[in-house]
Image: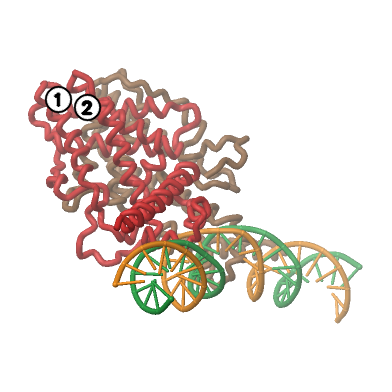
Chain colours: A brown, B red, C green, D orange
Amino acid sequence: MGTRERQDRERQAVTDSILDAARELFLAEGYPSVSIRKIAERIEYSPAAIYSYYPSKDDIFLALAKEGFHRLDAKVHAAMKSGDALENVRACWWAFYEFSKEQPEYFLLMFVDRSVPRITQQWDGFEFLQQLLANAVAAIQRAIDAGAFPKSLSPDAAMHMLWAGLIGPAVVGIRHRLASGEDYDALARDVLNVTIAGLQSGVETSFVSCKCAEEGIAGARVPAGATRHES
Amino acid sequence: MGTRERQDRERQAVTDSILDAARELFLAEGYPSVSIRKIAERIEYSPAAIYSYYPSKDDIFLALAKEGFHRLDAKVHAAMKSGDALENVRACWWAFYEFSKEQPEYFLLMFVDRSVPRITQQWDGFEFLQQLLANAVAAIQRAIDAGAFPKSLSPDAAMHMLWAGLIGPAVVGIRHRLASGEDYDALARDVLNVTIAGLQSGVETSFVSCKCAEEGIAGARVPAGATRHES
DNA sequence: CAGTAATATGAACAGTGTTCAGTCTTCAAA
DNA sequence: TTTGAAGACTGAACACTGTTCATATTACTG
């Protein structure tokens, strides 16, 4: 006895080493230039061996995306310790933008890159994402309660607006789509401030969230019956 | 004589047919799954022949990006014929968002996809882009003059904020990063309205454009002395 | 008609994700 | 201790990818 446990442990060790190698390459060279062969070489296995641990390359990067969400969660959590409710909201989304700068590859994978086509393992283990979103919504709710936002504001809609609004500056920054010398941080800060000011101004919004906590977000909504759609 | 002219014409015809084939495949299957071999097959040439018309695959898509900017220009121009200055600004950027829905692949190529690494032909022929940007800035300036925005607002900074702000909802829409059933258009509309409201509220901005008309935008700023930077 | 210049190609190179028939190791049961 | 089964691992291959280059074909000029 104990044999099975040891085997499981060894299997897990190899699984982890694959993820470690993938992460190193991924962060150093970016998603597209990481190949199964490079990962295999790094862990001193044959390329084929990888496939008895992960069904496809996409699944490896899915596991990394999961990691990415955890990192983002930690960063956002650390940023939101201000006493002021409005400052907390600002800090939350500034942390989101900073994450895009510190971990651009993770960010692209999580929010921008084409959703991986053949997802073998369903998006399980992403429940904590709901927690992350719920936190962001709660922070906005507190700011509403504190009078920093109008009572008529839907915290959920506001959360989506801040989220979508800040993805833009993040992408612009990562892809260097500004003239040289222009300040990406200033642009992001301005977008954040202007969005917050707009939300404060009480402009009416039409977006209605459909309880995204139950659906999951970030591509989680691959319909159960979706069979092999193109691209 | 006249021979040279005819040769040039024939050469141009093949060049165009390559672009036509690339565009069709590109719009139908998306950037990553279009290969030189597929383009070659479509125009009934060998893959190698392509390389005597375009130095690399990237250059083909660079030419398509140029097309994309022209299409965007036309769409934005058509949208901005309202009498009201503020409505014009709104229409301008709503057209920008709609372009992302109608031509997602063009949009990704122009604003999101990784900048092509080895750009053979320098970003020439993009001068009209400055015109596009100048138009957007001018529309904001008119709204300021009409009293719709505070006099203290920098039209250039505002333009950048609307631009960056709307890229987010566009990407979210293209990548389907919302829970099923949620309304992408509503989110984009809200982001646009909230951004405009924020700009109207007179929040101070820190972004300073460095006369982007002279530098070009959208990745044009590959420094002259930049030799082969990774990824 | 000879020579030259443009044009197009087949074959190859080095790389990709992935599959699969086998081998090799490990370990429990006979 | 031997046998047999299960699992892990690999080499080789398949069908792709972008790109290069010597070669062949064609067209035009002097």
Q: Quadrant of the C terminus of chain B?
A: bottom left
Q: Amino acid at mark 1?
A: Ala
Residue pictured at 45% horizontal, 46% vertical? B26
Q: Position of residue B115 (x, y in %)?
A: 33, 53
Residue topped by disc 1: B143
Task: Tell me: residue A206, above or below residue D7.
Answer: above
Q: Give the mark nearest the N terminus, 2 or 1.
A: 2
Q: Residues within 10 Å of mark 2 (few under 14, many from 20)?
A: many
Q: Nearer the viewer, residue C1 or A100?
A: C1
Q: Which mark is residue A76?
A: none
**Disc 2 is attached to a residue of which chain?**
B
Q: Secondary structure at mark 1?
A: helix
Which quadrant of the view contains residue B58? Answer: bottom left
Q: Residues within 10 Å of mark 1 (few under 14, many from 20)?
A: many
Q: Quadrant of the N terminus of chain B?
A: bottom left
**Disc 1 is attached to a residue of which chain?**
B
Q: Position of residue A167 (x, y in %)?
A: 33, 41
Q: Are marks 2 and 1 in contact (CB under 8 Å)?
A: yes
Q: Is residue B214 visible?
A: yes
Residue topped by disc 2: B89
Indicate left or right for A30 with A91 as reference.
right
Q: Amino acid at mark 2?
A: Val
Residue pictured at 29% horizontal, 39% vertical? B70
How many numbered badges does the structure rendering display? 2
Task: Tell me: residue A226, above or below residue A204.
Answer: below
